Image (cartoon, rainbow, N blue to C red):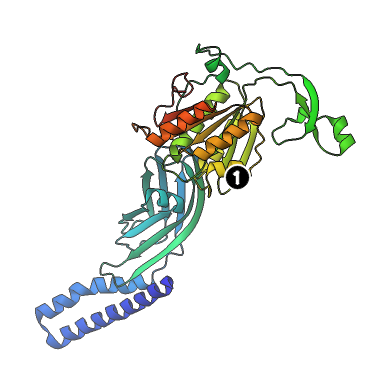
Amino acid sequence: MKKFMTKTKNVFGFVIMAFLLIASFCYAMFQGGFVSWFIFTSFLPLGLYTIALYFYRVHHFQVERIIDQLEFTAGEDVEVTINIKRKGFFPLFYLIVEDVIPELERKLEQPNKSIIYPLFKNNITYKYTIHNIPRGEYEFQQIKYKYGDLFGFIQKEGSFSTQKKILVFPNVTELNYEPFENLFELGMTATRDKVQRDSTMAISIREYEPGDRFSWINWKATARTNEIMTKEFEQSQTNDIMIVLDRSPHPYFEIAVKFLASMVSAILRKGAEVGLYSFGAKREYFPVQRGEFQQRTLFYHLAKVEDDAEVNLSTILDSEKLSLNQNRTTLLIINSADQHLIEKLTYLSRKKGQFYIFLMKGKGEKLTTVEHSFLELARKRGIPSKPIFDGEFVNAFSKGGW
């Protein structure tokens, strides 16, 4: 409909401009004199240009978008270059160029639009910078253009499809990670050594659960029962970490993602294994693993994750069967205080091991009375909990604050 209206407007503008040219010529012919001919000759070039612009097409335009890299970190600047080549030297008084990036426009609340004055140039280069780009995956879909005459009688617009995606990972803050048994049993002596994993002894077998290693499968029992059976090991504390991310819509969600990314980086750097439960519109589970591939996998998820959970975390824990190991530490990153969550964790801690809660807060903010009560109740129930303030991640694993 919009395209039809634009075309109709251009036809109407063409008719008006042709009528004005004929009228000014007739006026000069019948009136005579310097003034009437001066008006006609002054108006003639602009009128002829407007009529010629009506027949001008950009089918021979070639548009190219250049981005030097496809992966960024949140807060960086993205340099984008748009090259436009056209045949001929037909003058264009102005050219409005818009790079369409729907998701980025939604977050920044402004389009990437600029006006260029190419005149007779047939090679046009336009550069712009996206400052402080937020975390996310962005698809550059198309480049829109718009041009016209000085009077607005003729305006033409269109687009070129030039798709490209960039990925913006969350910003990572260096923090001092220590295994929790070091914090609560062995004191706070820091070490640069890698985490030493415990060796265990198989004492029974059980049904396979997501996250179990391939090497744990008991093939004889599997063949006998036609069900995948894994070895059950002697209960011993490990340094494996399972993280549960609260994706309920909240202003602190970006703080939670930054903290989670920093936590994952620190844990893997220590040589421990880490996994992730991410509950939202799409619930995703990443088994406990270690190494650069695991960090890459989790960071890719964190680049795109949104706070789109339709129910709160305590309700999700009620409906989900978490594959949590009794020997494994589980960390919950939450955005708001929820008394029902404490009740659920109290029940789960009897079967699923130790839980820790990190409550996200904005920079320089103070805990509310409800949040104080929430943290105290969690600690009384044997669930260590502490607030994490934006920009103060470094000592998140320190002994103080629990």
Instruction: State the residue position of label 1.
Output: 283
Outermost residue on the bottom side: it is 30
Q: In which quarter of the image is residue 296?
A: top right
Q: Quadrant of residue 35?
A: bottom left
Number of residue marks: 1
* Image position, residue 96 (x, y; %): 34, 58
Q: In this view, does 118 lie above or below 170?
A: below
Outermost residue on the right side: it is 224
| Label 1: which secondary element | loop
Residue 171 appears in view: no
Residue at the spot 41% in from the left edge and 45% down from the top edge: 80
Residue at the spot 53% in from the left edge and 35% down from the top edge: 342
* Image position, residue 111 (x, y; %): 37, 53
Q: Residue 267 versus residue 40: which sits nearer the camera?
A: 267
In what quadrant of the picture does the N terminus appear?
bottom left
Label 1 Cα neighbours within 10 Å, binned few <14 / some 14-19 / many ≥20: few
Q: Residue 88 versus residue 5: which sits nearer the camera?
A: 5
Residue 281 appears in view: yes
Relative placement, left or right, of 114 versus 30 is right
* Image position, residue 119 (x, y; %): 31, 59
Relative placement, left or right, of 369 versus 340 is left
Relative placement, left or right, of 324 versus 42 is right
Q: Residue 187 versus residue 59: which sits nearer the camera?
A: 187
Please, what is the three-letter code of the amino acid marked with disc 1? Answer: Arg
* Image position, residue 189 (x, y; %): 50, 11
